[in-house]
Image: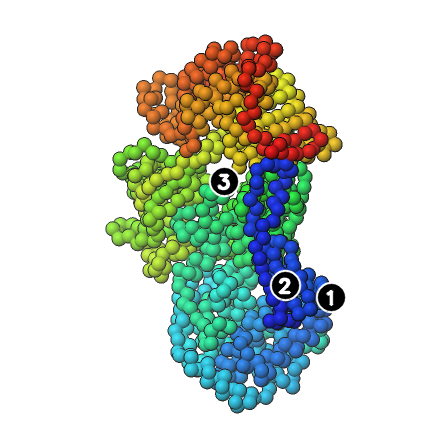
Amino acid sequence: MKLTPKAIIVQKFGKNAQFTVDEVQDVVQNGCPGLAIPQKGPCLYRCSLQLPEFSVVSETFKKKKDAEQSAAEKALEKLGIDPSPNVPSAEEAWDKLIASVKHLFSNEFLSSQSPLRGHFIAALRRDGDLYGSVPASVIAVCDSKLANLCKLINPKVESSHLLVLTYIMRAATRLSEFVVTSEGQLSLWRKDPYPPEIMESSIIRQSESLDSICIEAIHIPCSLEMAAHPVTLNVSSTGYYLDVIARTLDQTDGNKILVSSRTIGKASSEMRLYFAAPKSYLLDLSSDLPNVEEVVDFEGSLNPRASHLYGQDIYGDAILASIGYTRKSEGLFHEDITLQSYYRMLIHLTPSGVYKLSREAILTAELPMAFTTRTNWRGSFPREMLFMFCRQHWLSEPVFSTCSNSLKESSESSRFYEKSAALESAETGKECTSGGGTAASDNVRCEVKIFSKSRDPILECSPKEFYKKQNESIENASLKVLSWLNAYFKDPAIPLEKLNNLVGALDIQCYPQNFFKKFSSYRFIHNVQQRKMGEKLLQANSINMLNAIPEHGIYCLSIGGPDSGIYPSNGCLSFISYSVSLVIEGETMKELLESREEFEFEMGTGAVIPQVEVVTAQMSVGQSACFCKELPPQELILAAADDSARTFSLLSSRACCLEYHISLLRVTEPPEDRMEQALFSPPLSKQRVEYALQHIKESCATTLVDFGCGSGSLLDSLLDYPTALEKIVGVDISQKSLSRAAKIIHSKLSKKLDAAVPCTDVKSAVLYDGSITVFDSRLHGFDIGTCLEVIEHMEEDEASQFGNIVLSSFRPRILIVSTPNYEYNAILQKSSSTIQEDDPDEKTQLQSCKFRNHDHKFEWTRDQFNCWATELAARHNYSVEFSGVGGSGDREPGFASQIAVFRSRSPPEEDDLLKDGDSAHHYKVIWEWDGNGLSRSSL
């Protein structure tokens, strides 16, 4: 095993190596020279390492442990020590393997802290011919050093649990003076007895802490026609638990039992699969350096369920048990396994199951169809689930490649992501590319590749979509892979044509031969489950179909309680309480399976089963609903049930259905842009930019000021198109937003400057900190001014003040103002049907609508906006025309975003004149850029 630099230093110097970590405040590189706003940097650490002869100091890092390792690396470099391990050759690994096996049977090992020690002591309590024999399978499993040496000898060991046994047994044959082997037996003996004093002390110490125990385990038959069922393992104080498991599997002793080389479920547990060794296991003992393939004759058929749990083929019946010897426990460690936990492990092998368990809502939650925002996402994140899926199925960790629209690319393995600053940025939502450096304005897309342990390609996902943040691209790409995998696991018999359509829709490339080879066992499980469920569903069709929504699988629907008028809409978070019960046909008896006092999910993303979302969408806050649906896959029901054995009995004997009781507690309105994106493509924000761009081109404007520029989204977008603009200016009162805008625009302009053929003639860009209701003479007389979706964030009197100031003092030749059309909220929020012109309840419906954003101080109807704009234009000698984006001006309720375009009627020379006393500079320059690529602050 590779030692870290710090471990090498500690191993060499011990207490004489003193690591001291200090917190430091480093200079923040914000990627925007000249930005006048102080930038608060992350907490950084620096490590000083004092050794007897000298000391070293590390660079600064975000994590203390990274600083310590850096200091240790510097010390090793100064000492002339190479920290990289010397990887032994196959011959050297073989020699080390023989030496390691020899050490296991030494006097010293019996008093060690290795988990194997418990097995060796238990072997000394076995009776008759089994006395002192240690099953080779536990040696292979409990000593990771041996397994790693075997991998160096033959990399195929990674995908074959039997090859490790081969090499251990062959190594033992080279130790005939110390170790005894027997032809055809997978067990080892020490040739000479242990000294009495060692053997006695070890056995007494452990026997005193070991009483007879009963352990609940799960028997998994190889036949899918037989259900997995609980068994009790009775381990006496003088017995060996592997012998007990062997008898449960109709084997004579534990030497004939194989153990899964990795734990099932949590890595920290001792839960493993136990199954019979092959009937004959032929070994070629002729060469010193093994280069063999196993020759196996298994008894029994393939066990699809156990194979699926383990990730490798298992034949015959298997026992799932949590039992063994550990470093932490003096005696035998054990935990009971219930039928419920077994079924939870089964569903945890599917992407949807991972998500359901992370939400603790097996019968209600569903893997969402889209990753919207980290804020609205609930449960395990897609990237985290993809890593988990790969680990569970013995696949290599996923490889992510990010690419920005500036064509910077990088390909990173998952392990690098764990340590890289790119991942930390992704996890905290920072905008960056993984190729090094920060490019906040770049849109990023991410590709994912999945390989087998032997590096055979399984899946590739190459999304076409770009995202503003790297973490969004990673999460969305991961979710696409999970969605495709989920579709397969829901129906492994899916027709090839349908699977290919799904591949194209999700930008997936599948390697069928490698994929189906890996997941073939699940097809057997699914086929039997579907046949059994089909039999039960035929009987369940007699359930009352009154008040049904058959297309959604909803029956016996009833909604009660007063209508509060507050309905959930797409993008909002709905908070419900619910319970799910198993209802037996013809009886009043119900079996409660799952309930939550409060459960939240985002509407419109498929984060719950369709029936729950359809019913919730019809409810108002405070109402309750009850409905029935047909049974989902049986393993979901049994994973949710507390008494899985009883529930299984009910499912096997009677026709059943599920009954849901739901109460809608409250809803949290969606952000404005999310609500609009659900209805418009392209989004309204992009349509507004395109509208403004059209007028900028038509007017041949060379100067532009964006009032209320925020994070610079409009200015940033304008730089992507060829225009006559030479100077662009943004004004806002939020320094945080201006800081982001500066980074975005600086990055974009710098790239345009470096491009072989610049697509913009912008020679100057300035960002000001100030209120748009206060005049600053530096912004007088611009060709065009924009104020998109800003005035509704002000009080109405402030909006009127802005209108007067901008048209009387700033006096741009053209001013474009947009604001939400309140009448359109009924459609966006789905709080009523589309308002018709002759609808007598139009006023009532409008009153039930909420503002699109909690920060909006007002939202005007078309009449209110027209009145405001018309009066302003007449007052200041401007003409005004009305338009909009989203929807249609010819149909009710008009455009979703209403726009007024003001044009000055005064001669240009008159507009250019400043009034006396109007030359004051009330704004602060936050950042400015000139055509030579220089950024600076005037502060």
Mark 2 against mark 3, which lies toward the viewer? Answer: 2
Question: Which residue occupies the foreground of this view, 844 or 764?
Answer: 764
Mark 1 against mark 2, which lies toward the viewer? Answer: 2
Q: CA distance from mark 1 to mark 2?
A: 16 Å
| Disc 1 element | loop
Q: Quadrant of residue 906?
A: top right
Q: Residue at x 28, y 52 (%)?
A: 590
Query: For mark 3, what is the residue?
Result: 372
Q: CA distance from mark 2 to mark 3?
A: 45 Å
Query: For mark 2, what is the residue?
Result: 49
Who comes first in sequence, dot 3 or dot 1? 1
Q: Quadrant of residue 792?
A: top left
Image location of residue 33, percent across then percent down:
65, 38
Check disc 1 and give the amino acid type: Gly
| Disc 2 element | strand
Query: For mark 1, what is the residue?
Result: 80
